[in-house]
Every structure is written in C-alpha cells, then in structure tokens.
Image (cartoon, rainbow, N blue to C red):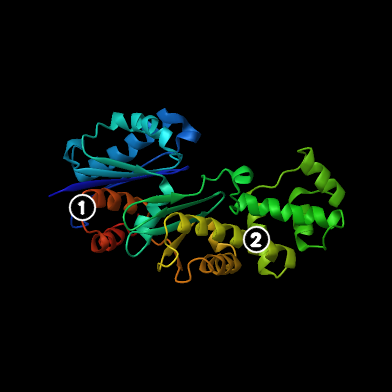
Amino acid sequence: MSIFLGVDGGGTKTHALLANERGEVLGFGAGGPGNWEGVGVEGMTASLQDAVGGALKAAGLEVGAIDAAGMGLAGYDWPCQKEMILGGIAPLGLTCPLEIVNDATLGILAGTTQGWGVSLVSGTGNNCRGWSRDGREGRVVGGMGHWSGEFAGGWDMLQRAVRAVVFEWNRRGPATALSGVFLELTGAKDLFDLIEGLYVNRYELGESAILRLFEVAAQGDPQALEVMRWAGRELGEMACGVIRQLGMEAEAVEVVQIGSAWKGHPLLTQTARRTIRKVAPKARLLRLNAPPVVGGVVLAMQRSGLETEAVRKKLIKGMKGR
C-alpha cells in the first residue's frame, strides 16, 4: 500500500491529510497558521508539525511510511523562496518526494473535474493561479494590490465603496446608500466628519463594513452594484491573464471560485464570467466544494504518476464533515 500526504497551509490554519492510492482517508490533522509571512518560518514549521503529526497519529503511522507528499503553502509566491520554505519543512523528517505549490493551486487540484484549470480567489484578499494539463503553472503577482494591478478582495471592494461615498460628498458622483451605512458604523455626525475621520484615523471600517456593502448591493443601490461589477471585471481579467499565460483560450477551462466574497452578490460571478468568456468562450465557473487539502494529496499522487480523477472524488467523500 502506498501512502500519500497532502498539506494545506493557509493564513489561519494548516490541514494535513494522509490517504492511500485507493483514495481512502487514513488520517487527518490540524495546526495553526501556515503562512510564513504572518508567523515566520518557525511558526510555519510548528503548524506543519502539529498538522502532520496529528494526521500520522490518527493513521497509526510513522513519517517514514509516506511515499510522496504535496503541499500548498500560503506565502510561497516566488522560486527564490523555495529553499527557505523547504528549510521550514525539513524538521518534519520527510524522506519521500515532495512537491510544493502556492496554496491557491490546491483549489484547482481539488475543485476541477480533471485536475487542471484556474483558481480565482476572492476573500478578504485575492489571488489567481493556473495549472495546465501538463503541470505548468500560471499566476498573477500574488495579491500585491495597486502596484501590481490586483484588486477585488473584500478590502479592495470596501475601498471602492468608500470612494463612492467620497464622491457623493465632493459632488464628483451621485448619492449612495453606502453613506448612511458608513455613518452608522462609525458614529460620524456627517459626511465631512466621516471622511475627515477616516483620513486622520479617527474612524475605521472593519470587516463588518464589507458585509454591509453586500447588503446595500442586494438592496439595489446603484453605486454598491457598480462596486460588484468593478470587482467582477478585475477578477475576470486576472483569470484571463493566467489563461493566456498557459495558452488555454480555446479550452473548456474550469475556473474554481474560492473565498467568501463570492457569496456576497451574484454580480461578482456574472461579471467575472462575461469577462473571462471574452478570452476563453468555453470557460466554466464553479465553486470549490472540497477541502483544499485534498488537492495536496492529488498533487502527491500526480507527481507519482497515478491517475487521480476517481481517487479525488473518493477523497472528497471521505473528508465530509471534517
């Protein structure tokens, strides 16, 4: 029996999954944040040790029993970081072949029907990765925002909404229901006080303001709806760039939507789909319905030359409820 390890190390948690070549789940473990940019390499190592150690304990196995491993790690953005990341993984004591990718790539391996396509992330931040049939990777810079032209995570949408309120105040734009909502959230007495307060950090808008933005859009406010369209276009254009990088314009490419912001308003999906289909007419958008850690196991199996489509479905079924 061959044993495969998958790891998903994100900004808030780390998951590890052990499975055999038949897709039977043998053990699962969890740890803390796995993004070295947030917790340092030592913190990443500790989270990996907790998650992988928990999976090994649940499976009743030693680390030497693992035949191949695949890891998706947040913060692994550039080839120059590989040695540093591998150094953080080394204390696990793995002696098997190991493949590491950015955590957004796991969504492709776990969420597409054939193990290739595009992941389009919109949560509090955003990301976009591609994986071709032959294992080539496409990507945007990695969520660097204004200087790299990557927008449309929840915080970016909120900034765009604040701009609409500023435009109401300075008469560059029409009135918006967002103004009343932000006055309520901050306790500001009027628009001047709100904008001055945001400028000098007397007031701040948190994640609750992002949720209220989606509510205002659902109520039909034109300026809030325009924020949704803007975000959908930005996300769609990122996916188009990755599709062009990998030469998938004529393919029936699947674009996996990852992140909580996609639930905010249907215009996000509708606008992103229209934007993507201008470049890839056969493209299909679908929501990720599997734990990303499944993609780590799939990555390990693919690098071992195994067929993974049927196995992936079994892994997803075995992970339900975890």
Question: In the image as oriented, which residue stretches furthest toward the left?
Answer: 1
Indicate whether 163 appears above or below 287: above
Q: Is residue 198 left or right of residue 96?
A: right
What amino acid type is highlighted by mark number 1? Answer: Gly
Apparent side of residue 234 relative to residue 41 in the rendered image (left or right) = right
Residue 294, image x, y percentages: 32, 53
Residue 70: x and y in percent read: 30, 45
Query: In which quadrant will I find the C terminus?
Result: bottom left
Image point (56%, 49%), residue name: 125
Q: Residue at x 43, y 43 (%)?
A: 13
Question: What residue did someone put label 1 on?
Answer: 305
Q: Position of residue 262 (x, y in %)?
A: 54, 61
Q: Secondary structure at mark 1?
A: loop
Q: Can residue 238 be seen here?
A: yes
Give whichever of 54, 52 is nearer the camera: 52
Q: Amino acid at mark 2?
A: Trp
Q: Quadrant of residue 179?
A: bottom right
Q: Which comes sooner in the sequence, label 1 or label 2?
A: 2
Q: Compute the Cα span from label 1 to label 2.
A: 42 Å
- Other-residue count near label 1 (Cα within 10 Å), few / some / many at <14 / 14–19 / ≥20: few
Helix, strand or loop at mark 2: helix
* Whole-percent x, y for residue 316 in the image: 31, 60
Q: Is residue 142 above or below residue 111?
A: above
Residue depicted at 57% across the width and 43% down the height = 144
- What residue would you read off at disc 2? 230
Q: Is residue 216 visible?
A: no
Of residues 303 and 93, the one drawn nearer to the viewer in this rendering = 303
What is the quadrant of residue 109 in the picture?
A: bottom left
Q: What's the residue at 65%, 54% (across, down)?
A: 157
Badge 1 vs badge 2, beta-carbon distance below 8 Å: no
Q: Nearer the viewer, residue 244 or 72?
A: 244
